[in-house]
């Protein structure tokens, strides 16, 4: 994410990079369709809500990163379709 002209802290970028690489290794193919991609984003958002509702802050942090990563992968998918 070098050259990104928005103010994301190095700590956040580090977590995003780690989770992004882990997700790509675990699931090299993100989704078979945009519908599945949206479903995966919603699933991760649900996991974040669950962690917050249960008062599990550490888990919530991890799930927030998952939401960001699957949203990035959905964005990549959308951008590929535009090319
Ligand atoms: Mg998750």
Image: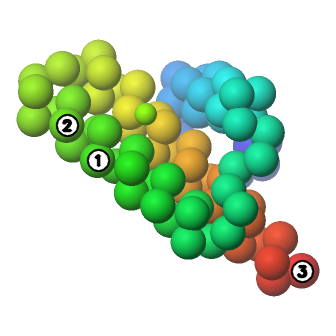
- The quarter of the displayed image where residue 58 is located: top left
Compared to 33, does 57 lie above or below?
A: above
Horizontally, residue 20 falls left or right of residue 83, namely left
Is the C-beta separation of discs 1 and 2 under 8 Å? yes
Where residue 44 appears, as percent x and y from the top left, is 40, 45
Helix or strand or loop: what does disc 3 sit on? loop
Quadrant (top left/top right/bottom left/bottom right) for the C terminus: bottom right
Quadrant location, ligand no. 1: top left
Query: Can you see residue 5?
Result: no
Q: Which of 36/52 is in front? A: 36
Where residue 76 appears, as percent x and y from the top left, is 73, 61
Residue in the image at 58% along x and 61% along y: 37
Chosen colour scheme = rainbow
Residue receiving disc 1: 46
Give the spatial CA distance, label 1 vs label 2: 6 Å
Horizontally, residue 76 falls left or right of residue 51, namely right
Horizontally, residue 18 falls left or right of residue 50, namely right
Quadrant (top left/top right/bottom left/bottom right) for the N terminus: top right
């Amino acid at each position: 994410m070098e050259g990104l002209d928005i103010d994301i802290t190095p700590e956040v970028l580090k977590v995003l990079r780690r989770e992004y690489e882990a997700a790509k290794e675990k699931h090299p193919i993100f989704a078979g369709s945009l519908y599945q991609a949206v479903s995966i984003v919603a699933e991760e958002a649900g996991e974040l809500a669950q962690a917050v509702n249960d008062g599990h802050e550490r888990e919530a942090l991890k799930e927030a990163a998952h939401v960001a990563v699957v949203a990035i992968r959905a964005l990549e998918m959308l951008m590929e379709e535009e090319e």
